[in-house]
Amino acid sequence: MAAVTDRRAGILQIIVREYVETAAPVGSRTIHDKYGVPASPATIRHEMQALEEEGLLEQPHTSAGRVPSDLGYRYFVESLMGQADLPVDEQATIRHQFFQAAPELDEWADLAAGLLARSLGLLALVSPPRSRELRVKHLELISLNDLLALLVVVLREARVLKQLVPLDGAFAQADLSLMAARLNERVSGRTASELRLATDAEDANEQRMLETLTGILREESAREAAVRVEGVAGMLGQPEYREDHTSALDIMNLVDQRATERVVPMGSLERGGVSVVIGDENPAFELQHCSVVVAPYGDQADMSGYVALVGPTRMHYGRGVATVRYLSSLLEEMMERVYG
């Protein structure tokens, strides 16, 4: 593509912003009268024609105005949008809500999805952080009766697992507390794989606890993390989907089937940054009329999640990028607080 002149870049920027706000094709008269571009409508039309020839604009069949193409949105995001940040007062409000919530990563994921969906009126997906392998923080044993104990396992991810374990012989709570102390010396900080290599214990009850612990860790690791999805109503209310029910249903089917790995292009995630996938850049055919703004959070090598915004290509990219970036950085900060 040839270099875009300053005047054409300014016209493209106006068309993107006007179209995002109105969902109506933008004509030269609007650009001249509303935005005061120092050129005649005829000159503006000529520049719009040049932008169309360069693939940055498209002309709907029924309109004399133009709309941005996928390539036009890409040029806008990379060259015209500039640094996008949330206003300080909005950051403070969001931050306050997180610190008012219970200190649990799953609850923070729910909160982030709701905030993102309401802020943009689009579809928000937030995955709670999950480790490649779950790691034990500590365990407790609680006596239910002389022959039955409750094994309580606290994970590094700030989750709690529980399992009933029968006992071989009568044990008081004091005995179970001593057993838990001995077990914690062996299991604290370890994964299921590491425990499988060191699960031999002289005491039969301790051996049963170790085997039970290894089993529930493996089961929990195999369970797919439930991605939080919010904003379905807002997404369906967008002008693009009020009449094009097929496209809307395609997106909703992906979400309903929890095929979120097709919605969020994991291969595009960049550590410490926000990725924007526009239109036909999406690998999923159903999303090639959509854009996805996504950022990872957490430790990619150990435990991570993502924050994603999905909407039509006619999206407020600046606000979307700013909100996704802030929420992902805040979730990462909250994770660091949980893990110390």
Image (tube, grey):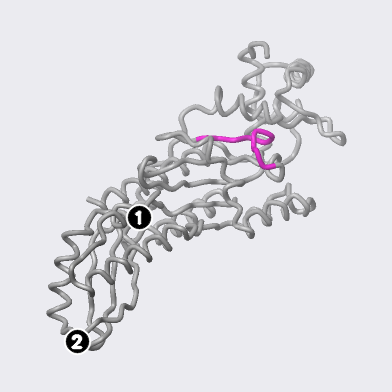
Relative to residue 320, is residue 279 drawn left or right? Answer: right
Residues packed near mark 1 inside 10 Å, few (<14), some (14 to 19) or many (20 plus): many
- Cα gap from disc 2 to disc 1, whole angstroms: 31 Å
- The x and y percentages for residue 273 are 44, 34
Residue visible at 76% across and 21% down in the picture = 52
- The x and y percentages for residue 204 are 23, 73
Q: Which residues are magenta?
A: 275-284
Residue visible at 25% across and 69% down in the picture = 207
* Camera-side residue of 101 and 171: 171
Residue 250 forms part of the magenta stretch: no
Q: Secondary structure at mark 1?
A: loop
Q: Secondary structure at mark 2?
A: loop
- The x and y percentages for residue 48 are 75, 21
Relative to residue 243, is residue 257 drawn left or right? Answer: left
Quarter of the image where one finds residue 5: top right
Q: Quadrant of the N terminus?
A: top right
Residue topped by disc 2: 170
Q: Amino acid at mark 2?
A: Ala
Q: Nearer the viewer, mark 2 or mark 1?
A: 2
- The x and y percentages for residue 186 are 19, 59
* Camera-side residue of 69 and 187: 187
* Camera-side residue of 287 and 176: 176
Residue visible at 43% across and 36% down in the picture = 85
Residues packed near mark 2 inside 10 Å, few (<14), some (14 to 19) or many (20 plus): few
Quarter of the image where one finds residue 291: top right
Relative to residue 11, is residue 171 drawn left or right? Answer: left
In the rendering, which numbered label is found on residue 134?
1
Classify 19 as above or below 178.
above
Q: Amino acid at mark 1?
A: Leu
Classify 198 as above or below 148.
above
